[in-house]
Image: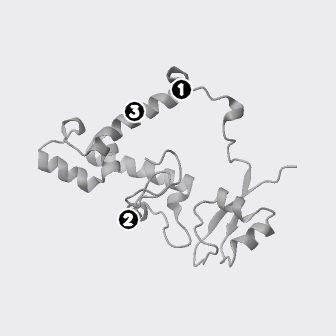
Amino acid sequence: ESNLRNVVSSANAKGFWQFRKLAAKEMNLEVNDQVDERYHPEKATRAACKYLKQLKKRFGTWTDAAAAYNMGPTNLSRSQKKQGQSNYYDLNLGQETSRYIFRLIAIKEIMKNPENYGFYVNEHEKYPPLSDYYEVEVDTSVNNWGDFAKKHGITYRTLKFYNPWLRDNDLTVINNTYLIKIPRRTN
């Protein structure tokens, strides 16, 4: 849905995993004006995996779980009841969800065997992993992320790049701790 990007959908679902606000909060992701963990790659991925497992348990198959993830579990249940069917392949669903499963299967196969489908990416063409960083524990309010970044020898832009879930220029901390990624300097 997101093309592996931190984007916003027309339904206001956000991040790589396209969580709507209520679902994000149900998966214990913090969502407010200053922090939106739907944009936190690690936390949102763990939440998406947990949510998919819950949907698999509820609906019985990974296919139905994926359909519920796409259209919402309430809408899938409603469609199943209305149509008297429980299997995704026997349901008449909207175009987006009808194509969603096949897109998942296609992208899985392409990512597993990219060369079989004409995708050749040389090592030097790949984005480098964002793995050379350390984390700073923040347990007090931050008045200005620009000042915080400067103090740690990076730019505001770099801070936001490594921490896309920070949504404002400040952070009010009350009984919480945040781990902020700071890239290591390269000489």
Label 1 packing within 10 angstroms: few (<14), some (14-19), many (20+): some
Tell whether 80 sits left or right of 142: left
The total of numbered circles placed on residues is 3
> Which residue shows up at 79% across the image and 65% down it?
152
Residue 5 place in picture, x, y as percent: 53, 49
Can you identify the residue that label 1 sits on?
114
Residue 131 place in picture, x, y as percent: 69, 47
Residue 72 place in picture, x, y as percent: 30, 54
- The amino acid beneath tag 3 is Ile
- The amino acid beneath tag 1 is Pro
Mark identifier at residue 105: 3
* Contact between labelled residues 3 and 2, with CB atoms less than 8 Å apart: no
From the viewer's perspective, is residue 144 above or below residue 152?
A: below
Residue 37 place in picture, x, y as percent: 52, 62
Tell whether 27 sits left or right of 142: left
- Mark closer to the chain start, 1 or 2: 2
From the viewer's perspective, is residue 108 above or below residue 97?
A: above
Q: How is the image coloured?
A: one colour
The image quarter containing residue 140 is bottom right
> Which residue shows up at 72% across the image and 71% down it?
146
Q: Secondary structure at mark 1?
A: helix
- Mark closer to the chain start, 2 or 3: 2
From the viewer's perspective, is residue 153 above or below residue 75?
A: below
Q: Secondary structure at mark 3?
A: helix
The image quarter containing residue 107 is top left
Label 2 packing within 10 angstroms: few (<14), some (14-19), many (20+): few
Mark identifier at residue 22: 2
From the viewer's perspective, is residue 139 above or below residue 105?
A: below
Q: CA distance from mark 2 to mark 3?
A: 27 Å
Q: CA distance from mark 1 to mark 3?
A: 13 Å
